[in-house]
Image (cartoon, grey):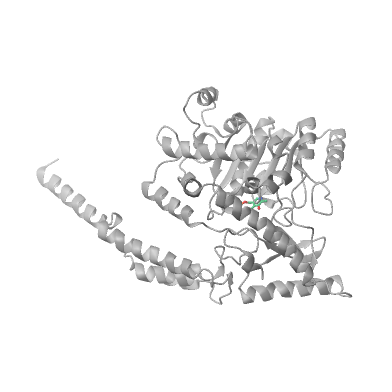
Amino acid sequence: MADPERAALLDRIRQLERAASPLEPGAADRQRLRDAVVGSSERFLEKIDTLKAYEETADKGIGLLRNLISEHGIPIETVIESFEQDVVRPGGNPASAGHLAYIPGGGIYHSALGDYLAAVSNKYAGLFFTGPGPVRMENLLIRWVADLVGYPATAGGNIASGGSIASLTAIVTARDAHGLKGADYASAVVYLTAQAHHCLEKALRIAGMGEAQVRHIPIDDRFRMRPEALEAAIAADRAQGLRPWLIAAAADTTDTGAVDPLDAIATIAERERCWFHVDAAYGGFFLLTEHGRSVMKGIERSDSVVLDPHKSLFLSWGSGIVVVRDVKPLAAAHGYSGDYMYLQDALREPGEISPADVSPELSKPFRALRMWLPLILLGTKPFRAALEEKLLLARYFHQEIQALGFEAGPPPDLSVATFRWAPQGASLEEANRINQQIVDQIKRDGRIFLSSTLLDGRFSLRMAALSFRTHRKTMT
Ligand SMILES: *Cc1c(COP(=O)(O)O)cnc(C)c1O
């Protein structure tokens, strides 16, 4: 390269380095940015008790579109103002104690700090070779969850982004573990109840198994799968030459908070050689409580289980865990090399299984830290206490709502209660209309946020106590 040409090239490189320098703010700029961001989160947390659980706004955050992404940035003050006004304010507020709709999130602060540390260090969490720390951390959390479930030493799993992706991972594992190929899909049979979460049928479809036969097993008056009906369905399918494959039970169902009789289902699954999956996305971490362990008895006999730390462990959105009793089929379904012998070494050696080998992800955020940090800092005691509190709050609510004259659904297995206003003499349509009005009215008021469901055609209100911020005073 001629000298002038080289000089021009170096000059251009210097210019670009300068133009790119905002990507690396110095200590003073970092402080300024951090103060603005922390200031906003402090304002939010300081007034969280008075913020609405649902804020109905006409604009629905449309103001966000005023600030266009262009060649030049805008000041952090403007950005935070729009963030608070257009992003945080409108709609549901899952951080609020009064958020009793759907499944409340929560978002403990320690978890947010874990996200911050994870993002700043940006440690790679996909492969043990380059990220031994994050991978050990993920695997120790998987082991902690496996112990909670009661799985043997062979168990393995993955921290995914949520319960839906974790469920997909379990379905794909179950499919391959049973050697199902395209030609078998139409005769493969899945057993669940009409109360099962829709993410399971969605996962089946994404896994290419949309043609699989899905049986909705009848439920009892508390919305739990009836084991004898499951046995009958399996027998009928065998008689027709179909291939019973997967039984998916819930612990507990999103809609009514029912826990299926896991122990009885496990016995059937073992005898019928079906893959037994437990969807504990909502209720899983109630295993930390004595009551939870007793209602979920039998979960330890399942083949795979999904639990959402962003639900019953109070983390902010973004964590769902799948644990499989035996890591081998999980790795066989998700490993890339196709040579799984190394797994035996990995299990024997002090080395660790890499998340990339047991999930669809390669690069992944350092998700373990958002769960590990709160657990290592606080220990399990406050989590157990908060979960026991939710169980009792749901029981309390179930009694109080009847004292107020509402018709209550079954006593809560965990922390969801359903109820409806059913005035004497009102027709089903009238009652449904009144209950719809109650939900709409509560939403407009916004202090609390409840959702609804249709149970046997009856429009019912639904109260889910799962936020760590929800206490006795929220219930009154
Ligand atoms: C929330 C939920 C899911 C789906 O999990 P996401 O984390 O929302 O993807 C599945 N099953 C049950 C029982 C749930 O409550």
Residue 344 lies left or right of residue 119; in this view the side is right
**Quarter that holds the N terminus:** top left
Residue ID at (60%, 63%): 470
Q: Quick check: 179 above or below 294?
A: above
Q: Quick check: 78 above or below 204?
A: below
**Quarter that holds the C terminus:** bottom right
Residue ID at (47%, 48%): 377
The location of residue 308, given as percent across then percent down, is 60, 49
Q: Quick check: 153 above or below 322?
A: above
The location of residue 24, given as percent across then percent down, is 28, 54
Q: Quick check: 461 above or below 246?
A: below
- Please tell me how many numbered marks the rendered image carries: 0
Asked if one can make out residue 189 in the rendered structure from this viewpoint, the answer is: no
Residue 111 lies left or right of residue 206; in this view the side is left
**Residue at the right extreme, as displayed:** 425
Asked if one can make out residue 66 in the rendered structure from this viewpoint, the answer is: yes
**Residue at the left extreme, as displayed:** 3
Residue 159 lies left or right of residue 128; in this view the side is right
The residue lying toward the viewer, choosing from 405 and 215, is 405
Quadrant assignment, res 240: top right
The location of residue 378, given as percent across then percent down, is 50, 50
Residue ID at (70%, 48%): 291
Quadrant assignment, res 461: bottom right
The location of residue 34, given as percent across then percent down, is 35, 61
Residue 350 lies left or right of residue 171; in this view the side is left
